[in-house]
Amino acid sequence: MTTSAFEFFFKYKPIVYQKGKLAFQLVGSKWWFLPVAVLCVVAAYYFYRSIARDKWSPGLVGLRGLTFAVLAFMFLRPVLNVATVLPQDSYLAVLIDNSASMKIRDEGEKTRAEEMLKQFEDTNFFKRLSDKFKVRIYRFDKDAERIERLDRLTFEGKRTSLESGTDVLRQDLSTAPLSGVVLLTDAVDNGSQQFKESLAKLESRNIPFLTVGVGAEKIDGDAEIIKVDAPREVLMDSTASIDVSYRSHGFAGRKATLRVMENATTVVTAKEITLPADGVIAEYTVDVPVKNEGDRIFSFTLQTTNDRIAENNTLDALVTVRNDHPKILYVEGEPRWEFKFIRRAVEDDKNLHLVTLLRSSTNKYYRQGIENEKELADGFPKTKEELYGYKGVIFGSIESTFFTQDQLKMVSDYVNNRGGGFMMIGGRNSFSGGKYQNTPIADILPVTLGGDKAPVIDHVKMAISDYGQTNPLMRLTPDATANMKHWSDLPPLADFNRTVDPKVGAVVLARGHGEKTGENPILLAFQRYGRGRTMAFTTGSSWRWQMEMDAKDQTFEVFWKQLLRWLVNSSPDQVTVTSDKDTYLPGEPIVVTAEVADKSFERLNNARVMMKLTDPKGRVETRSLDWGGSEDGAYQAQLNATDEGLYQIEVEASAGDKKVGVYRSAFQVKDRPVEFYNASLDAGKLRTIAEQTGGRYYPLADLGDVPDDAQYIPGKSSFVEQKELWDVPFLFMLLTASFGGEWLWRKKVGLA
């Protein structure tokens, strides 16, 4: 029922009934009416019993009782006692969204701002409010301020912060009798930090919010990019798999183009995609080759025709391409084909430094890839400092008894605390065959070890799991269909180490099907473990892909390069630097954090950390980063950058007179139109604010109801007003219906 229809039937608006308390002028409390109503029904019963013992019915009694009850209700002079503000005795704040999203045309020709201003004029909004309150008007976007006239509204704010609005009210009207707040916004809040806390402080003063939703909850004819999820750092000459999330309204099933550009000058690729059903968030993975060292900005643009909001069609991803040479230690207990071919597969990869330790006989080792004669001279590292110098560790076919318990525990700590990568490759002395059950290695593996010792000799085709089909580790060719065919065409593997189940949180990328045993073993799985990651590749015969395929086929090389790069890609250095975001608006606060650790990766709290910041114009600023005291080894600085472009960060840490390390990173400052992303009216948020504070939510079309409803806000500046109900039209309609219904019924049974 609309407000006007309700008012026609019940004399007053719904809010009067919501806020008012029923009472009777003749008897006071509303509870007196209950016995009166019962008495009316009893009187009707005895009336019909006396005139017609055989023809009366409960229906006639009910209608006569209803008639008596309505008459009694009207006779008792019912009223609603409702709190009403004393005119000009309190303040009412009007908070108006001044951000750029108010310039969006949801439908038709008018912008949200134009629709709102028209409603102000059509409803005589501020004049009607001023009849009851001392009205103060505020505009807010990133910041908030009081304004005297509506022509101070520019609708050009680059961010929306509801918190700025509530904060300015607490400051400006801290001691004033504030009866309520009218909040007009689309509620697209992209600038608040602690809005709930700020709102709660006003809520504690019993200040209700009358929220008014401006805009449409669904914008037809709009496609937008929601998110771009890219790796922050990758090794040079690799492929960055970047996930692009997008959605649309009104374009379901339509074709669009997803274009990727590098540093705004070079088109990397353009893919045709299909837009999903309205409101559904779809995801597309783009494989972007990264060949140039340095900080690269990849821009993703969704191109379609007749898009209502073109500003939300592009998002950037900042990817740092490192020309590093992470060291990986690969330990084998015996010469075998897998070892030989893995070394050969990565020997031309300039960004992978594979160090191998091959046991040739008892206490004798064949070392390759070492940097000096002392490296691994005594076999597997015995100290954290030596082991932690590697970013990845691989165990091949080598039994657990080759290592001491301290070394096995050290490998577990290496993954958990240092953040290194660990992999075990199948073989006769791997997994259960190497008696790794009940060792610290069993704890970090992504699979549970069983009791079987020897690997199973069986032909097994590698079958990619559903998750593996979308994981970049299993991508041999860009096209998904061709990629799956490529995997199915590979020669079968000749063996596997039997495991039990994947652990909770582990991801299975591939299984197999044994021709002889019919088993479905896990062949490839990984998991996060502490700060690091671990992988299990349960076969030792992937070399067959090299031997049994065409000599020009690069499947084996691509597969192992991807695995080893993944193994070390997230392993941290002793000094690392991050910013809380990759892209900032001009003037937005920037938090830079450096983490510093010694060679054992114990966090250092007494380091000297210096940062050199180079802005887009080449100007250099040097400053120190301070230890915050809350997190070991974490040093922070807050920056403010106004010039658009790429900012280079170089952080150097030292402890005493020794240099700990140097790390480089970057961030971008760009005047991005954030107000046009996810820009639909968030009516749910406004309803929550209203309910939480004891107010009410209104669509913009009902703005004219706000001045009338606002006067019924209870508070110190209110008095109790009585609204008479005895002459409510609905009561007369009900009385007519009960009289007429009873007469027709009596006529039907011969009592009329």
Image (tube, grey):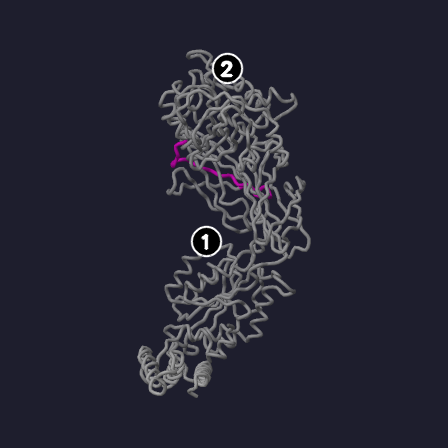
Q: Is residue 615 magenta?
A: yes
Left or right? Give the position of 41 relative to 584.
left
Task: Give the overall secondary structure of the magenta segment.
Answer: loop
Left or right? Give the position of 87 relative to 459.
left
Q: Is residue 187 magenta?
A: no
Left or right? Give the position of 49 relative to 689.
left
Q: Quick one: 156 or 749, which is closer to the camera?
A: 749
Q: Which residues are magenta?
A: 601-620
Neighbour tally class for label 1: few under 14, some 14-19, many 20 plus, Cα within 10 Å: few
Which image quarter: residue 124?
A: bottom right
Q: Amino acid at mark 2?
A: Pro
Residue at which label 1 appears: 193
Q: Quick one: 318 or 56, which is closer to the camera?
A: 56
Q: Is label 1 in a helix, a strand or a loop? A: loop
Q: Which quadrant, please, contains the C terminus?
A: bottom left
Calculate the distance from the C-alpha at mark 2 to the C-alpha at mark 1. Answer: 59 Å
Q: Is residue 115 above or below residue 541?
A: below
**Is any atom of residue 242 visible in this view?**
yes
Q: Is label 2 in a helix, a strand or a loop? A: loop
Q: Is residue 265 above or below residue 516?
A: below
Residue 360: which numbered mark, if any?
none
Q: Quick one: 419 or 516, which is closer to the camera?
A: 516
Residue at which label 2 appears: 335
Pick out the residue farthest to the right.
305
